[in-house]
Amino acid sequence: MNQIANELSTEKVSSLLLKQSIPASIGILVMSINMIVDTIFVGQWIGVLAIAAITVVLPIGFLISSIGMAIGIGGSSVISLALGADKVEKAKKVFGNQISLTTLSSLILVTLCLVFEEYVLRLFGANGNILEPALPYFRVIIIGVPFLAYAMMGNPIIRALGKPTYAMIALILPAVANIILDIIFIKALGWGMFGAGLATSIAYAVCGLFILGFLLSKKSNLKIGLSYLKLEKSIVSEISSLGSITLVRQGTVSVLTIILNYSLFKYGNESSVAVFGIINRLMMFIFFPVFGIVQGFLPIAGYNYGAELYDRVKDVLNTANKYGTILCVFIFIAVYFLNYEMTAVFTNDEELLKQTPNAILTTLLATPFIAFQLVGASYFQAVGKAKPALILTLLRQSIFLIPFIIVLPMFFGLDGIWFSFPISDLLATVVTYVYVKKEISLLKN
């Protein structure tokens, strides 16, 4: 623990941010490549409807596993603050409670999804001809979701412990496994959507088991006994307070997915749902370095805030915003010039090649400005301030984006859906700037 404390509290902020962010970025890159390759294989070897089916099913799995993410991010913030205040025993209790909460919640939700599978799929937009390929994919992938929940729970803890390389490996292993298994199950064995789902489900298990194995080993400094698994009301409350931000965000994403898929089907067709599936995969891929900066920023800000080193907190916030904005400008330039080529990687379907490039460009028009939004919202979560973190998280994906997706297509059709994204991003960035500026002015060493 002393080595971690020395690094997080004394090392040059720019170097420390890169040290934390680069492994996170590489891990996210590999994970996003995995998602892209998965979609490419499905699109090229099965068809357009298969892309639409994946677009419908994956948000269901991520909603369930997001409980693990919420528990992980909320708990990792508590752990960072506890380690900053030299409260190691509390950090261990928090970790034990995280394991118990993740196990109970994910198993209950997976069971409900299996019992009401067709209803759940239709709710998330499996309309028209999408339901048929979605069913076999859903049935097998949902079994692996508890492992994904463990992975999402554990990865933020690994970063909070100052072990970003292990967090990176945890994302690389399942990505490699999924790509290899996709080739075997879909191409070689011809198992179609079942094979695609089985490959992803096994990959989730690889990731979840690796992360749990690491955290329960001596390497993590959080090795615990069975007594730490007993839920404590005060710790659960603290985890929930901060984790609810992530859970509400992911829940909002699910509501957004439902509304978005219905709107895309209403104002377009099954192909329009597939268009957004491609855009969604691309966004995960092209923004990987920015997401990496945000992930690297969290433990540094949380630890130094807990240690009351507020100048370092301001420094890492400014540095993360600067690096993130520079990256976003380069990302937008690439999108502007290469949107057609990006689409052609996924499919040779004429309808998708016609719709997707313009939709990509329109959706990502506000890219140069969104780094501040992402880092700013994460700041409040890192320092344990749940209310402003929740408000800023909801701005884009609920308060702004959902109403725009409902209203704008009434006047502009399918284009109205795509323009909803940059408008929401710009508004959310302005509000985030106001919040963060006010908060930083109150920090004094």
Image (cartoon, grey):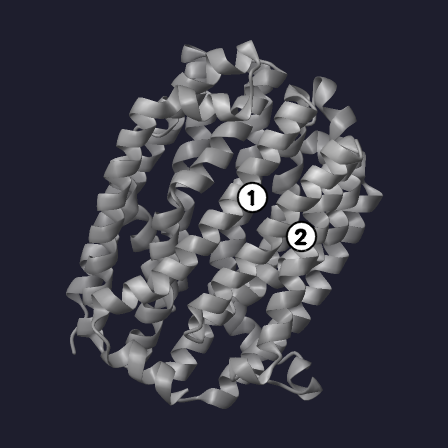
Please tell me which residue is depicted at 57% across the width and 85% down the height of the picture: 218
Q: Secondary structure beneath disc 2?
A: helix
In the rendered image, residue 375, in percent from the top left (x then y), is placed at 31, 54
In the foreground, 122 or 174: 174
Contact, mark 2 vs mark 1 (Cβ under 8 Å): yes
Inspect this view and state whether residue 345 appears: yes
Q: Earlier in the sequence, mark 2 or mark 1?
A: 1
In this rendering, the answer to whether 10 lies above or below 38 is below
In the rendered image, residue 257, in percent from the top left (x then y), is placed at 56, 34
Other residues around mark 1 within 10 Å, as few (<14) / some (14–19) / many (≥20): many
Please tell me which residue is depicted at 35% across the width and 30% down the height of the picture: 364
In this rendering, the answer to whether 86 lies above or below 258 is below
In the rendered image, residue 147, in percent from the top left (x then y), is placed at 68, 59
Residue 203 tag number: 2
Q: Identify residue type, mark 2.
A: Ala
Q: Secondary structure beneath disc 1?
A: helix
Please tell me which residue is depicted at 17% across the width and 73% down the height of the picture: 311
Inspect this view and state whether residue 255 appears: no
Residue under label 1, please give it: 34
Q: Is residue 442 left or right of residue 407?
A: left
